[in-house]
Amino acid sequence: MRKRNLLTALSLAIAVFSLAAPLASGGGKAVPRIIFPVVGPVTYQNDFGDPRGGLRHQGNDIMAVKKSLAVAAEDGKVTFWTHSSSAGCMLYLDGHSGTMYEYIHLNNDRTMKNDNKGKCVAGTAYAKGLKNGAQVKAGQPLGFVGDSGDANGIASHLHFELHPHGGQAVSPYRYLTRGRVLLFAAKQGSEVSLTLKGTLIAADSTLGTLNMRVTSLTSSSGLRLKKLSRKLTLDLSPDTAVAYDSGADAALGELDSLDPGVTIEVETQSVPVTLASESGSALTISTSAITIMSS
């Protein structure tokens, strides 16, 4: 079993370094197209190798709102790591491709403030119900972004490392930029409905399509996302109820004549949690009700 105890402390609070000896040669051929490991608005850059005191940064820092969902980059097995003052709450994902991923600085706060009152346990650092050693599917929630360990009080982020063949760390950046970005994430095998707010791009009631730009999302699973900018093509169900925010009903065909940019709120039908629906693939999500906002 891979040794886990060679993770070294950072000299700066914003990142952490893994100096584990390689088990095999590097190279990225075994790395699949990954699922982007954080759901919701993020910022990141190619900071791999940047100096951190006398060390070098061994991952990329994905800046995100505290308690944003961290999800599995690919199918694999998770191992919790709860005993590092530098990494804080973290986990390893041993991908089925042979790639190993590290998720570092997971949440240890009970509130949205930096209270440090939580522990490295499921429901706080790790996804509710997730167990150490569990087999997980790509896109499955693993934990919550935080600022534990040496990142305490600095800025919430996921320090994400990628180790092809379980060996030396390589920059995750090109894999992140090509990663499959999820619209939402939820427990595998469940069904969810969404409330999507945003602006209309175009609707065609004959073809049964509605194109919109989503700016916020609420899921029946409890996920809430703001400051999105995501184009979606929804299946415009003929049974969709349409109304104005004044309370007046509207015909489905009236959507076709609306000007682009009109603000709308869309309630969706329940959808099975699959990678296609979580990714917001075209026509995988069907409308149930649409409200046309006056402003």
Image: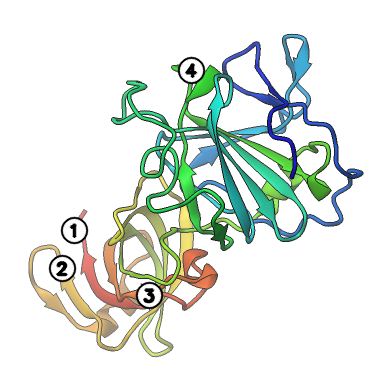
Does 255 sit above or below residue 215?
Answer: below
The residue singled out by tag 1 in the image is 294
Q: Is residue 6 left or right of residue 40?
A: right
Determine which residue is flagged by label 4: 154
* Whole-number angstrom distance, CA of label 2 to CA of label 4: 44 Å
Percent coordinates x, y for residue 43 in the rendering: 56, 36
Percent position of residue 237, x then y: 33, 84
Seen at 41% across and 65% down, the residue is 212
Give the mark, 3 or 2, whose residue is nearer the N terminus: 2
Q: Do the residues under discs 3 and 4 have CB atoms within 8 angstroms? A: no
Q: Would residue 36 be visible to someone looking at this image?
A: no
Measure the C-alpha gap from mark 2 to mark 1.
Answer: 7 Å
Q: Mark 2 highlights which residue?
A: 244
Residue 222 higher or lower than 11, as above or below: below
Reading the image, the residue beneath label 3 is: 271
Q: Tell me the amino acid under the disc marked 1.
A: Ser
CA distance separating discs 3 and 2: 25 Å
